[in-house]
Image: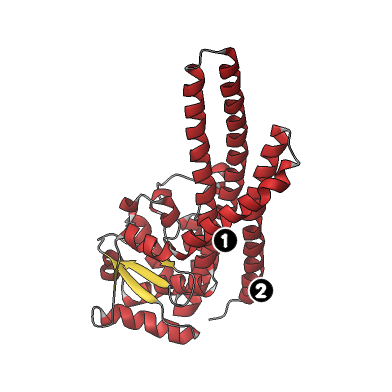
Amino acid sequence: MRYVGMHSLMQRNNTLSVLLLLGFPAIILGAVYLFMVFAGDTSGFVKVLPWVIGIVAIWFTIAYFSNTSMIKHAVQAEPLLRRDNPRVYNIVENLTMACGMPMPKINIVEDPQLNAFASGINDNTYTVTLTTGIIDRLDDDELAGVVGHELTHIRNNDTRLLITSIVFVGIISTAMTLIVRGMWHAALSGGGRSSKGGKEKAGGILIMLVIALVCAAIAYLFVLLTRFAISRKREYMADAGGAELCGNPMALASALRKISGDPGLANVNRDDIAQMYICHPQALNGKKKNFLSSLFSTHPSIETRIQLLEQY
């Protein structure tokens, strides 16, 4: 089976994703500069710039390299070896040999429902995670389509890009939380001051924190939209790549239909992890997406994905 233009689409998608990811640091620095403009001290931007870059770099490095253990702990996954389930191991191994990629780790989650996802940032951490439900309730062809989808995510560096975007979203989200707490404390301390000067000082601090919150909220909105755009585009690519790798688009379409009817891993309650799933559980609510909801969706509609697969 041959997909005309697949290589060109992959190159264009990778270039777009790199540009989007370069935009994350720019958004953070832009929010800081905007705050300095509102504060009336643009010259101070140069002074705080090294601190912002340093804190973000350290934070990003720690979060980036600890993601594997964090994800494994969140979904309560356990490693799967050949002796544990030769059928699953052989399906993954055969597909990796077919596309010439290293064998990733395989994790399994005790969940009777159906879902799967890929994670990792390099050959040592790349992992395909499957629920017991998806293993038990899909036939070999359907399971191969799902595994092919996840392997395509790894081959296209989707997991690395997605984890990068998740870390940046986490940085801004935490900054917003700290600002809100600062506003709360400033309001409380201001209300308890008896002197006029004390109240004015507390009021000034509160105004600055409000400005900081607005800047952070704007940055958070742009980062979220960027992250969602990356996820949606790459789901289409992974579907096409998975169908090509397993050689049976109809099998992957059938698997998606079954998964959408009973998606698992919903109890994880971590949207940053849920966006890695082959089907996002919370997105499958049966409602037709409008333009606004589509902007904030990490996955394209399951119906559209199935229709595209059935056209091949």
Lateral position of residue 147 relative to residue 34, left or right: left
Q: Estimate the x, y position of residue 174 in percent, counting from the top left.
A: 49, 45
Mark drawn on residue 233: 1
Residue 311 in view here: no
For the residues labelled 1 and 2, say whether their Cβ atoms are less than 8 Å apart: no
- Relative to 192, residue 109 above or below: below
* C-alpha gap between disc 1 and disc 2: 14 Å
The x and y percentages for residue 118 are 43, 68
Q: Is residue 140 above or below residue 260?
A: below
The spot of residue 109 in percent (x, y) is: 28, 64
- Dot 2 alpha-carbon crowd within 10 angstroms: few under 14, some 14 to 19, many 20 or more: few
| Residue 214 placement: quadrant | top right
Query: Residue sitting at 53 percent across and 36 percent down?
Result: 179
Q: Nearer the viewer, residue 8 or 81?
A: 81
Amino acid type, callout 1: Lys
At label 2, the amino acid type is Ser
Judged from the image, the secondary structure of the residue bearing numbered disc 2 is: helix
